[in-house]
Image (cartoon, rainbow, N blue to C red):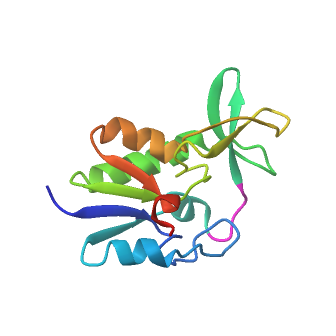
Amino acid sequence: MSNKVVISACILGQYCRYDGKTKKIQSVVEAFKGCDIVPFCPEAPLFGTPRERISIVEIEGKQRVVQELTGKDVTEELTKEIETFCKNHPNVSSFVLKSKSPSCGNQTTPILDKNGDIISFGDGLATKIFRQKYPNLSIKDENDFEA
């Protein structure tokens, strides 16, 4: 097994968040020095940076990824992007993903109702897919590395 670690690109310091900013977390960067780090952000290549914010919305009992302003459902586009990433990186050893993100959250992503109210917290779309594709691997977020 390789020591290939997938880390949310914003945590690594890339300016790829919806608001054009970064969320660099030095403790994560330090923890994986010497590892083969693969930056991950499925949203930026599809929607650009900065971009319209997306959320996970429960619609008719199903969780969908929806752009906040336009209401456009982008679940399929994002799913294809994430699945392509998985095909391109079959030998991964672990994940460190951005908490609360609609793509990367690990039991911290707000799940909204159609009115925009939080009804629960769950996994982002990428985290759900990673759990299926890499069932034996650890998925952490930046909170696991804070002092």
The residue sitting at 42% across, 59% down in the picture is 96
User: Looking at the rendering, in which quadrant would you find the N terminus?
Assistant: bottom left
Which residue is more in the foreground, 138 or 6? 138
- Picture quadrant of residue 110: top right
State whether the magenta stretch is mostly helix, strand or loop.
loop
Q: Is 16 drawn above or below residue 96 in the view shown?
A: below
Q: Is 11 drawn above or below residue 130 in the view shown?
A: below
- Picture quadrant of residue 74: top right
Which residue is more in the foreground, 43 or 108? 108
The residue sitting at 60% across, 53% down in the picture is 101
Q: Is 41 drawn above or below residue 103 in the view shown?
A: below
Which residue is more in the foreground, 65 or 113? 113
The image position of residue 122, as x and y in percent, is 59, 38
The image position of residue 34, as x and y in percent, is 24, 78
The residue sitting at 30% across, 78% down in the picture is 33
Residue, far top: 60
> Which portion, as a residue range, is magenta?
49-53
The image position of residue 48, as x and y in percent, is 61, 67
The residue sitting at 51% across, 78% down in the picture is 13
Residue, far left: 1
Residue 50 included in the magenta stretch of the image: yes
Left or right: residue 137 compared with residue 116: left
